[in-house]
Image (tube, helix red, strand yellow):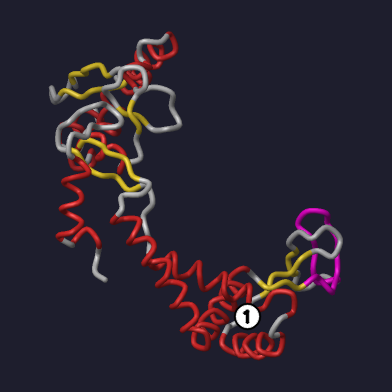
């Protein structure tokens, strides 16, 4: 089956679904679009199925001999690396060339010749990748079967417009950018972690303070007469000819005749 949104059947159903619809965010009827809340990521879903199948296949000691066989083969293919840890507190130790005991803990100061040896995360992830690769070679049919069932269900849900919302072009664009419509003014957008948009925020006491702090003030450079906008917060520092050159001018100060002439004066 091809991509659902490329079929004439889906396009026909889409026209019917959007007929007499309105944007669920702002109520607009202009350039309506269907936003699917669940996006099927083929590679991500396949990896999830593979991981789950392998975990269930070997859990509670099942198929122990096969797991040992695959693990032995994986260990042969991975260049194992280790980290050495303090036997007292479990933190990293460092090796000394001339002093004994050879290792000393960076945290508690414990000295030892026999630190704990632990495989690094790099080695563990390498072993896991090799295990999954070899497991897939043996059980690909089962994994593919589950994946295709999930994909078919996702395509059916897509065709039936399950878990969707109707948005106008503007709101849909904002949604794709991770923004939400301001509940106060109903016109502007903001990140979900904020309670209101910037315009509404600047009407509050705290917002007015921050807006005043961040406002830009035009500064005419006394040497070259270029105009730069400097934030009020940094005016005392950057409203200085040399600092303005460094912070705001696009020209290289070391190659600017005007700057070199005035800096050396």
Horizontally, residue 48 falls left or right of residue 23, namely right
Q: Is the magenta stretch mostly helix, strand or loop?
A: loop
Check the image and report above or below for 146 versus 220: below
Other-residue count near label 1 (Cα within 10 Å), few / some / many at <14 / 14–19 / ≥20: some
Q: Confirm whether the magenta stretch covers residue 110.
A: yes
> Which quadrant holds the N terminus?
bottom left
Quarter of the image where one finds residue 91? bottom right
Task: Give me the residue at 26% from left, 22% from top.
Answer: 187
- Which residue appears at 67% of the width and 78% of the height? 58
Q: Position of residue 181 (x, y in %)?
A: 33, 28
Quick one: SS at disc 1?
loop
Judge whether 44 appears above or below 126 on screen: above
* Residue 236 visible in the displayed image: no
Which residue carries the number 1 mark? 80
State the extent of the magenta-drawn residues as a range. Answer: 101-116
Question: Foreground: 187 or 82?
Answer: 187
């Amino acid at each position: 089956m091809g991509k659902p949104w490329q079929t004439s059947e889906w396009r026909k159903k889409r026209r019917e679904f959007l007929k007499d619809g309105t944007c669920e965010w702002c109520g607009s009827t202009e350039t309506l679009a269907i936003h699917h809340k669940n996006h099927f990521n083929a590679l991500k879903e396949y990896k999830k199925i593979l991981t789950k199948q392998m975990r269930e296949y070997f859990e509670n000691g099942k198929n122990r001999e096969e797991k040992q066989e695959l693990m032995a083969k994986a260990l042969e293919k991975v260049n194992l690396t280790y980290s050495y840890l303090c036997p007292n507190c479990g933190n990293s130790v460092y090796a000394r060339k001339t002093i004994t005991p050879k290792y000393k803990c960076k945290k508690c100061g414990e000295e030892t010749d026999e630190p704990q040896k632990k495989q690094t995360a790099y080695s563990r992830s390498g072993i896991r990748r090799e295990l999954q690769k070899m497991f897939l070679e043996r059980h690909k049919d089962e994994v593919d079967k589950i994946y295709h069932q999930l994909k078919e269900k996702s395509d059916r849900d897509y065709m039936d417009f399950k878990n969707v919302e109707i948005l106008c072009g503007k709101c849909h664009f904002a949604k794709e950018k991770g923004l939400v419509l301001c509940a106060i003014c109903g016109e502007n957008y903001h990140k979900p972690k904020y309670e209101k948009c910037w315009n509404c925020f600047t009407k509050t006491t705290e917002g007015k303070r921050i807006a005043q702090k961040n406002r830009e003030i035009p500064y005419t450079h006394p040497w070259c007469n270029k105009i730069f906008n400097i934030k009020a917060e940094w005016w005392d520092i950057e409203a200085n000819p040399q600092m303005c050159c460094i912070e705001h001018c696009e020209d290289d100060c070391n190659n600017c005749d005007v700057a070199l002439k005035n800096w050396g004066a």
